[in-house]
Amino acid sequence: MSVITFKKLKDAIIYAFSCTPDEASKHASIILDLFGFDEYIIDNILSNDERRLILNMQTKGMISAMREDTTLSNGAPWRIYYWHLEVKTIIEYAKNKKNKRDKCKDLEASEQSLDIYSTITDNQWMHHQ
């Protein structure tokens, strides 16, 4: 089982939702506090704000829902909902963010190398002709 670190989750959230690092840090902290070292949590422990965050992450495939039907001792049916942390998907989002950051650095470097022409004075251009 792969481990989701704070940095991986934060990077995945930044990439998936295009949010600021501060917002991603806040959301990553909430998710890690809820799940701890587990991949599953029960739905009835969540506040409305936590559930909203989980539902948003579900839209990106980072979290999935499960349910279990059981019968109580008095014969009444009971349904239990769980949330599952999709570790592989989160790691892929985190890798994509790193790849995107590397591509941006490469693009900046190529733009800087193209900028060499702006350092040539008009006089030098005229001399070359």
Image (spheres, rainbow, N blue to C red):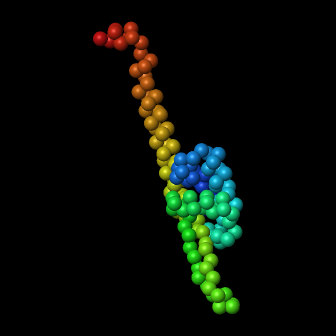
Q: Is residue 121 above or below residue 71?
A: above
Number of numbered tags placed on the structure image: 0
Does the rendering let one see residue 2? no
Q: Is residue 54 above or below residue 104?
A: below
Quadrant location, the N terminus: bottom right
The reply, left or right, for residue 74 in relation to residue 9 is right
Q: Is residue 95 above or below residue 77?
A: above
Residue drawn where x is 49% and y is 43% of the image: 102
Does the rendering let one see residue 85? yes
Q: Residue 32 at what x, y percent from top left?
A: 66, 60
Q: Is residue 91 above or below residue 102?
A: below
Q: Nearer the viewer, residue 68 or 38?
A: 68
Q: Nearer the viewer, residue 46 or 119?
A: 46
Residue drawn where x is 61% and y is 58% of the image: 53
Residue drawn where x is 51% and y is 60% of the image: 59
Q: Residue 87 at what x, y percent from top left?
A: 56, 63
Q: Residue 33 at what x, y percent from top left?
A: 70, 60
Q: Nearer the viewer, residue 10 or 48?
A: 48
